[in-house]
Amino acid sequence: MRGCIGILCVWLLALCQPVTARPAIEIGAERSALYLPMLKGKVGLVVNQTSRVGQQHLLDYLLAQGVDVRMVFAPEHGFRGEADAGAHISDGVDERTGVPIVSIYGQNKKPGKDVMSQLDWVIFDIQDVGARFYTYISSMHYMMETAAENHVRFMVLDRPNPNGSYVRGPIREDAFTSFVGMHPIPLLHGMTVGELAQMINGEGWLAGHVQVDLTVIPMRHYQRSQPYSLPVSPSPNLPNDSAIALYPSLCLFEPTTVSVGRGTPFPFQVIGHPQVALGPFEFTPVSGAGAAKPKWQDTALQGIDLRQSSIHGLDLTLLVSTYQAITAKGLPFFTSESFFDKLAGTDKLRKALVAGQSAGQIEASWQQGEAHFMQQRQPYLLYDLIASEIAN
């Protein structure tokens, strides 16, 4: 009895101890003392609406600090992040500053010597979400490549990966290389953009195995397992933490007959179909900002509201069950098998669905590739891993 009282006292004492607050993450862009002294010469920025130092856009901040910013490179969704997925991005001029804007999404993903000869530095500062098919890292790849070829220095101002706890999915196979799959990495790679830039450079993944003169400005107080709520939406259809958590699992529905909620107030937070009642939730996609001509526009759909879901990382359960429900009715599931394979980075996932494999069977087939990648990426990591992260 005396021992039990002692244990109880220790437990109560522990509860009464003050909780030490975790230091706030200091992103790379906020560590200006590390990078401002380096920025001598003419600078180009790969930025969008997420590129902020506090409440100020990085472009405005650097100009105020006297940095000679000559141009902005605009990725998918544009400089201000308002364009639809896949929409054409045009060259232009920033109205506020007069700085020229050069599109790097569409036909001209990789600026040539005529543009790069005007620069001494390119700075990449865009919030990513940690999925291989999210195209900001593809734009980073091409800009690293042209910087290397034209002897321009490249800097990454690092930011958190909101899906950083997860290394999941098939490794992209060479036959399925595309703008939504530039690198032989899992669908979820668990790396920050700074770490990934180091890996792209170190593994010789740039064309001709060129290497860029790379500087990464790391964060302070960042842990991969630490929840991170993005202060600015990274793209029009990822408006909140729920959508970002579900995106790796739901993006695989894009080349199918299933809606993921584009054209609703909750994109990438629902699924639905007009002919198969996937669940009791009803919604109707409509055309609007960020979702011009969405799938099943103006059509009532029945499906599942995932806004309170615990799904995070990459979960195939919904994909498998939905495929089975739709094909059991004799209805088509894929709208583009080739695009599905590009998103997956392999045709093995699609073939496994058709063969009737379970989510567990498919996910088990990834384990060897995931383990190899975990070892391969180790030299490029800037932030410590803990046991729970390794287990994922």
Image (cartoon, grey):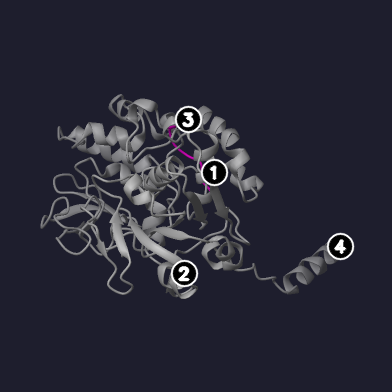
Q: Which SS class for mark 2?
A: helix
Vertical arrangement, residue 108 with respect to residue 158, above or below: above
Residue 355 position, x and y percent, is 30, 24
Camera-side mark, 4 or 3:
3
Q: Quadrant of the C terminus?
A: top right
The residue under the point 30% across, 32% down is: 341
Q: Nearer the viewer, residue 9 or 133?
A: 133
Residue underneath mark 3:
364
Residue 238: mark: none
Per the rendered image, the range of residues in magenta is 165-171
- Quarter assignment of residue 242: bottom left
What is the three-letter code of the residue carrying label 2? Answer: Leu
Q: Quadrant of the N terminus?
A: bottom right
Tell me how far mark 3 sits from mark 2, CA to CA. 47 Å
Residue 217 position, x and y percent, is 57, 57
* First along the sequence among labels 3 and 1: 1
Q: Which SS class for mark 1?
A: helix
Camera-side mark, 3 or 1:
1
Residue 62: mark: 2
Label 3 environment density (alpha carbons within 10 Å; few <14, some 14–19, many ≥20): few
Q: Are marks 3 and 2 in contact (CB under 8 Å)?
A: no
What is the three-letter code of the residue carrying label 1? Answer: Gln
* First along the sequence among labels 3 and 2: 2
* First along the sequence among labels 2 and 4: 4
The residue under the point 28% across, 27% down is: 354
Residue underneath mark 1:
198
Residue underneath mark 4:
1
Vertical arrangement, residue 236 with respect to residue 168, above or below: below
Residue 13 position, x and y percent, is 79, 71
What is the three-letter code of the residue carrying label 3? Answer: Ala
Tell me how far mark 4 sits from mark 1, CA to CA. 58 Å
